[in-house]
Image (cartoon, rainbow, N blue to C red):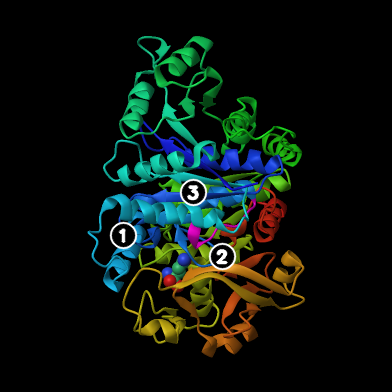
Amino acid sequence: MNTKYIFVTGGVTSSLGKGIISASLAKLLKARGFSVTIQKLDPYINIDPGTLNPYEHGECYVTEDGAETDLDLGHYERFTNVRTSQANNITTGRIYQAVIEKERRGDYLGETVQVIPHITDEIKYRIKILGNNGDYDFVITEIGGTVGDIESLPYIEAVRQMRWEMGSNCVVIHLTYVPFLAAAGELKTKPTQHSVKTMLEQGVQPDIIVCRTERPLNESIRHKIALFCNVDSKCVIESIDAKSIYEVPVLMREEELDVQVLNKMKIPIETSPDLIKWEEFLFKLKNPKTEVNIGLIGKYVELKDAYKSIIEAFIHAGTSIQCKVNLKMIHSESVTDETIEEKLKNLNGILVAPGFGERGIEGKIKSIKYAREHKIPFLGICLGMQCAVVEFGRNVLGYSDAHSTEMNPKTSYPVIDIMKEQKTICTKGGTMRLGAYPCKIKENTKIYDVYQLIDIKERHRHRYEFNNKYKDAYQQAGMIASGINPKDNLVEIVEIEDHPWFVGVQFHPEYGSTVANPHPIFVSFVNAANNHNLSK
Ligand code: GLN
């Protein structure tokens, strides 16, 4: 089958969940036996979201090939269990950079370089790249932002051109919002009509309209939207608020979103989606047998999206053992000698989150000391692992001012230090240790029990590393390096022998966790928390 292209645009407002709709459609098509990939086009000028503050854009998700990407790519992987790559997230910045580089090279010699056709050609090229070698039956392309934004105009124009070129090999799904007006006591279709009109002005007629709503759409609303927006009423799809994002594929199956897409593309429907495993997951999610409280100590706790992959990894892991994880978000700055007992005493497990910079560091280190001394299961991720090393240095080895040189360049014990290769880098974007690196695990360690493997590969995003000068001292005192990068001998995992479950990882296991494959570190950590007796 020739690769088919599905576009998902958004109208009325942002944050309607285009990423979840795209991921759910991909899941349904995969469950019918098709191969699918999802791509996100982001209309901002940054080359990638790597330099964006989590307050602006939530978590930065890292792919195996080392791209710093939009957090929606995390949803794509978690839903479909298919890895994404550099090619799956493109920004306006990257498009313009490519076009300007070509112009300087002389590729357009003599021509005036313009939005149409040069920018739109580059956009189309980036979309088709994923379909070119026949790996996928479907490429789903989510266009970030909302139609009508100045920034998204070239993208909608590229969609218009691709539909013209490809006919029924191309389908456009438009996600809108149908608000319920309490005073009038009814759902309102006008915002949807306006947003479809905006698309029509730009030359694109959506084939399918997905309506995000808090109340069910009745037949007359569906007919009205169909009539005003020139679509079949079967192609008006309700997307009602769900308790969990993982219910959305099942809701979309009921609404037959995948059936309408296949019909539009004239693909015969020979199978039905196999969601047995997915439904088992949903059953376990809704029927937990146990419950644990895990504290997430970080500095962006008021922002749900900043720790998206960690939150989802806990859902996958907890569900796999039918344990509900109540994640308590604790601001690291609020953990002080006075508050620590109150804040941490009811926790079955403590996670110290990844992060950058000095703010809240001492609260993280104090929380780790508490977890170590009270034998509470502890997981440190990236900066969390580095803080565990600092804490052990200060409080067990007696290195009074031990620190990472990121926080204190003058420390007399630089137990976490910048890598040699990083010292000469001055630019910010894409210059960290990024993407998947191999790691060798030591046998007879906690982490070996977790993976049951010697060779693993996990994704990284950091500049600083465990300083090998101190490795022997740490190991003799009981913090062992149980995972090492075989190529450059970097310490990737530390653990404390005399503790029920104390693990720090320099990499980000949360990026790799999916519904189909919960990450073993999270599963084992939740299990340990589940076994941790609070009365001890
Ligand atoms: N700031 C630390 C470093 O750059 C940790 C980064 C992280 O937690 N992702 O090494």
Q: Closer to us: mark 1 or mark 2?
A: 1
- The one of 41 and 505 positioned closer to us in this rendering: 41
Is disc 3 placed on a helix, strand or loop?
A: helix
Q: Earlier in the sequence, mark 3 or mark 2?
A: 2
| Left or right: residue 270 compared with residue 353 | right
Neighbour class for label 2 at 10 Å: few (<14), some, many (≥20)? many
Q: Closer to us: mark 3 or mark 1?
A: 1
Are the residues flagged by discs 1 and 2 in contact, CB closer than 8 Å? no
In the displayed structure, 264 sits above or below 111; it is above
Q: Residue at x 34, y 84 (%)?
A: 410
Magenta segment range?
81-87
Q: Earlier in the sequence, mark 3 or mark 1?
A: 3
Please state the horizontal and vertical placement of residue 384, each as a whole percent of the image.
51, 66
Furthest toward the front, the residue is: 110
- The one of 519 and 375 positioned closer to us in this rendering: 519
Does 84 appear in magenta?
Answer: yes
Q: Residue at x 61, y 38 (%)?
A: 246
Q: Earlier in the sequence, mark 1 or mark 2?
A: 2
- Identify the residue under disc 3: 72
| Left or right: residue 279 compared with residue 15 | right
- Per the model, the C-alpha gap separating discs 1 and 2 is 25 Å
Is disc 2 placed on a helix, strand or loop?
A: loop
Please state the horizontal and vertical placement of residue 160, each as a whole percent of the image.
39, 39
- Residue labelled 3 has its Cβ within 8 Å of some atom of ligand 1: no
In the picture, the disc for residue 64 is 2
Callout 1, which amino acid? Answer: Tyr
Q: Quadrant of the C terminus?
A: bottom right
- Identify the residue under disc 1: 96
Neighbour class for label 1 at 10 Å: few (<14), some, many (≥20)? some
Q: Residue at x 49, y 9 (%)?
A: 220
- The one of 172 and 45 positioned closer to us in this rendering: 172
Are the residues flagged by discs 3 and 1 in contact, CB closer than 8 Å? no
